[in-house]
């Protein structure tokens, strides 16, 4: 007897990496082995030395094939088994382990847009739909487009055992969101990559495509982000509001705002304009219940005096290994120095 293992990895395409995958047939009960691929075809190697290595790091049931088949997320290694230059997961693992005692957790809100050919799903041929306003969390065929794909994707994610915590329609026709978490930094990032792969794969069956472009349509339309919710044990405990303020302040210190933003996804200046519920990309701010701030403190958090913060800057196309690593490193370092751990 055999089973199918779909090996999934993040390639070296710039400025935004793509997902790649291929299938291996293994004997039932076999361990998942290291595997190789042609890095010269994925922007990860030269043709004269093209071999790269896939190391399984996260496995879940394959909801599309079913049975005993699995999805296998992999890190990319060099042939000496060191992390490949495109492997951003390895550095996150080290950072997460260093600050594990603070128990950082994340919830990431992944926005995306369906396209049918060269236009967003729901946009009329040769024109534009009604202005945004009624689409967000809407209902009805006149305002909602792609729900069948969204529901299929949700079921696939749940069958795979991913920590999906919700879905909703967003502010533009054909634009949706799913949320992953709260989970620890490495797991939330691993699961987000798997959920993205399942989004693309599920959409194939409906003959539509999904994009993480941060500004899929120019003009008076919201962009697509990956708002990143973050907390530590100290922030979640009674009296944690002081730690929340420390975390918010740390994200605005010195060069930190630009250090973060330049790693928050390609095309971020097109989305973070100061309009459409964003702060300008080159200015940092935080505030309670303020969706025009870089970092929002939810009103309930201020009321309870504990909870989490939402970094609203990351693009939909952000690398979750980068955003979680940067937030853990910046915030947890500041909390450690302030004795708020």
Image: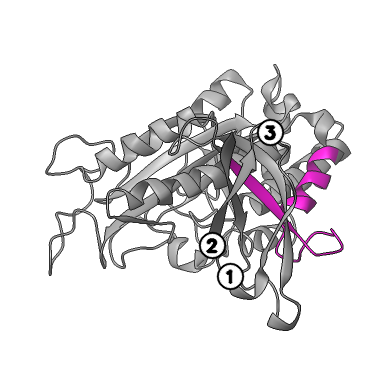
Task: Decide if residue 117 is on the left or right side of residue 154.
Answer: left
Residue drawn 70% across the image and 16% down it: 238
Circle 3 sits in a helix, a strand or a loop, which is it?
A: loop
Q: Are marks 1 and 2 in contact (CB under 8 Å)?
A: yes
Frontmost residue, 85 versus 129: 85
Residue 144 x %, y %: 20, 42
Q: Is residue 254 above or below residue 172?
A: below
Circle 1 sits in a helix, a strand or a loop, which is it?
A: loop
How packed is label 3: few (under 14 Cα within 10 Å), some, or many (20 or more)?
A: some
Frontmost residue, 238 versus 221: 221
Residue 151 appears in which quarter of the rendering?
A: top left
The part of the chain drawn in magenta is 71-97
Q: In the orientation shown, which residue stands out farthest toward the bottom?
A: 48
Residue 155 x %, y %: 39, 31
Residue 268 x %, y %: 51, 64
Q: Are marks 1 and 3 in contact (CB under 8 Å)?
A: no
Asked if one can make out residue 341 in the rendered structure from this viewpoint, the answer is: no
- Which numbered marker is on residue 184? 3
- Which numbered marker is on residue 18? 2
Task: Decide if residue 195 is on the left or right side of residue 74.
Answer: left
Residue 102 appears in which quarter of the rendering?
A: top right
Indicate whether residue 288 is drawn in magenta.
no
- Which numbered marker is on residue 103? none
User: Which residue corresponds to mark 1?
Assistant: 13
Residue drawn 81% across the image and 33% down it: 100
Q: In the orientation shown, which residue stands out farthest toward the top?
A: 238
Camera-near label (1 vs 3) is: 1
Frontmost residue, 29 versus 279: 29
């Amino acid at each position: 007897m055999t089973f199918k293992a779909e090996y999934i990895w993040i390639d070296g395409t710039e400025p935004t990496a793509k997902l790649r995958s291929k299938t291996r047939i293994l004997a039932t009960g076999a361990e998942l082995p290291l595997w190789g691929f042609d890095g010269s075809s994925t922007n990860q190697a030269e043709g004269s030395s093209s071999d790269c290595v896939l190391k399984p790091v996260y496995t879940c049931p394959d909801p599309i094939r079913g049975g005993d088949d699995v999805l296998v997320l992999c890190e990319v290694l060099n042939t000496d088994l060191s992390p490949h230059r495109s492997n951003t997961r390895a550095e996150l693992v080290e950072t997460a382990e260093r600050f594990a005692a603070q128990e950082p957790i994340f919830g990431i809100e992944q926005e995306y847009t369906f396209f049918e050919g060269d236009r967003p799903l729901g946009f009329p041929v040769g024109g534009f739909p009604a202005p945004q306003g009624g689409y967000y969390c809407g209902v009805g065929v006149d305002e909602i487009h792609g729900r069948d794909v969204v529901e299929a994707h949700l079921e696939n994610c749940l069958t795979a055992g991913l920590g999906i915590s919700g879905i909703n329609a967003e502010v533009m026709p054909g634009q949706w969101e799913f949320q992953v978490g709260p989970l620890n930094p490495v797991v939330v990032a691993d699961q987000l990559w798997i959920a993205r792969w399942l989004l693309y794969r599920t959409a194939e069956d409906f003959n539509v495509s999904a994009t993480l472009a941060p500004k899929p349509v120019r003009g008076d339309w919201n962009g697509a982000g990956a708002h990143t919710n973050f907390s530590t044990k100290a922030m979640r405990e009674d009296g944690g509001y002081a730690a929340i303020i420390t975390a918010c302040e740390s994200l605005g210190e010195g060069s930190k705002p630009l250090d973060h933003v330049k790693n928050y996804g390609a095309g971020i200046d097109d989305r973070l304009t100061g309009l459409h519920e964003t702060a300008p990309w080159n200015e940092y701010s935080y505030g309670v219940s303020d969706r025009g701030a870089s970092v929002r403190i939810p009103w309930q958090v201020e009321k309870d005096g504990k909870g989490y913060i939402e970094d609203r800057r990351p693009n939909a196309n952000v690398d979750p290994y980068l955003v979680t690593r940067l937030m853990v490193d910046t915030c947890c370092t500041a909390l450690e120095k302030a004795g708020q751990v």
